[in-house]
Amino acid sequence: MMTSIYILSFLSIYFVVVFVVPSVRVKRKTGINPYVFKNTDSAHDFLGKVSAPITSLIFIVALVNLFYPAGLQYFAPFTWLEISILKYAGFAFIHLALLWIILAQVQMSNSWRVGIDHSARTELKTNGLFSISRNPVFLGMLITLAGIFFILPNAITLLVAVVSTLLFQVQVRLEEEYLRNTHGELYKNYCLKVGRWI
């Protein structure tokens, strides 16, 4: 029971810390709304539309796990993966990933955006975690999803992890195109030194 409460609490705090806090901080410092997905039919905005419902599935699993544990049977659980070592690894993953994401967001400072802001020229970040990964925030999110799957291994958490991985792959490529157009040779040289993920 306590574990179920903790998982839901962690996910709620995670959402606030990863999305709400940096968005509010950037809005206050720059006056710019960092959420830049619009309601168009572009590939970029399509990603914004599908991300929220996909992510909400994780919260649904956590809610069912807390209030109606027997209902997890309807999510096609992988019972053979329900072992202590994977669960402990999952908890380690989600906590380390959150710290990693927070550090990356602090290093991004006012360049933080949810989506691609074509109306502003943000600074190219190449130091700190960005000297290890070109996309440390997305990498942290992928590690988080892997951790959630290890803690609650079922078809829904696997689906979210797989679909999110595909969405992130598309999103980072769209961002890379924008950064190449914006920063030119500086970004091309950066790509030669630092990998997309690690």
Image: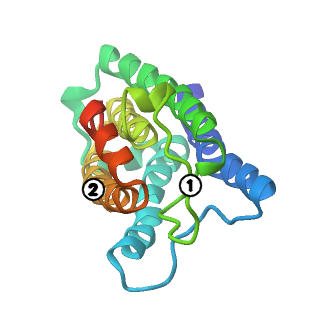
Q: Residues within 10 Å of mark 1 (few under 14, many from 20)?
A: some
Check disc 2 and give the amino acid type. Answer: Val
Compared to residue 82, the image places residue 171 above or below, namely below
Which sits in the foreground, 7 or 180?
180
Kindly indicate the quadrant of the structure image that contains residue 130.
Answer: top left
Q: Residue at x 66, y 48 (%)?
A: 110
Q: On screen, 1 above or below 14? A: above
x and y percent of residue 149 in the render? 33, 37
- Of residues 162 and 39, the one nearer the viewer is 39
Disc 2: CA contacts within 10 A as few (<14), some (14-19) or many (>=20) = some
In screen coordinates, is 20 left or right of 133? right
**Residue 56 screen position, x and y as percent:** 48, 58
According to the picture, the residue beneath numbered tag 2 turns out to be 163
Q: Nearer the viewer, mark 2 or mark 1?
A: 1
Question: Toward which corner of the image does residue 196 lie, by quadrant?
Answer: top left
Residue of label 1: 122
* Dot 2 or dot 1, earlier in sequence: 1
Q: Is residue 149 left or right of residue 144?
A: left
